[in-house]
Image: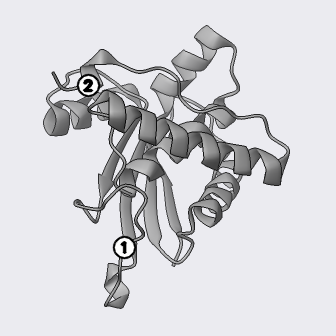
Amino acid sequence: MGVVLRNLQNVVPLRRAKLRKDVEVLRHIFGVQRFDMGIICVDNRRIQRINHVYRKKNQPTDVLSFPFYEDLRPGKIPCVLQREEYNLGDIFLGVEYVMQQCKETSQDLHEALTVVTAHGICHLLGYRHETEEEWNEMQQKESYILSEFNRLTGSHLEPLTKRSTQDMRP
């Protein structure tokens, strides 16, 4: 039971050991350390293709999540009956996209990757942000998770504050 971390891009130098360590801390805080998950780091071309196929948005993005359990209530830990069900799903990190955002905001890449990974794990656990209410609920959870992360690691991470109107349904 663990994290499969794959780096399928070569545009941005990545410290995988640091990211893996941060993901393990996040899994502990979320209470999902017994569950497997995949973290796949990709470039803009690949994340744009995935975003286009699955969300009909032909543009790169920071993170896409593919939950194993699609109908979870937000924050509910899956009830597992079989060993092979100890899987949360996969998170694709748009590392090149995140790096471009970091350059614009003078933010550290690896800190930003930790924040977007926390966002991705929230999605694996049923959180959405298609309405204002859902956004607020997810923002609250991310704030709590990152404050715990900061307390445990001495970091100063903050949740994603950017809310795209494209993510909200009319």
Q: Amino acid at mark 1?
A: Pro
Considering only vertical position in the picture, is 109 above or below 148?
above
Mark 2 touching mark 1, by CB under 8 A?
A: no
**Mark 1 secondary-structure assignment:** loop
Furthest-right residue in this view: 154
Residue 21, quarter of the rendered image: bottom right
Cα–Cα gap, marks 2 and 1: 26 Å
Furthest-top residue in this view: 104
Expressed as whole percent of the image width and height from the top left, the position of residue 142 reads: 55, 42
Q: Disc 2 or 1, which lies upstream in sequence? A: 1
40 vs 158, left or right, is left
**Residue shown at 67% from the left, 36% from the top:** 110
**Residue shown at 26% from the left, 33% from the top:** 130
3 vs 132, left or right, is right
**Mark 2 secondary-structure assignment:** loop
Q: Quadrant of the C terminus?
A: top left
**Residue shown at 52% from the left, 69% from the top:** 32
Expressed as whole percent of the image width and height from the top left, the position of residue 145 reads: 62, 49
Residue 62, quarter of the rendered image: top left
Q: Amino acid at mark 2?
A: Met
**Residue shown at 50% from the left, 33% from the top:** 95
- Give the number of the disc on residue 168: 2
Which residue matches tag 1? 78
Evaluate whether residue 165 shows in this view: yes
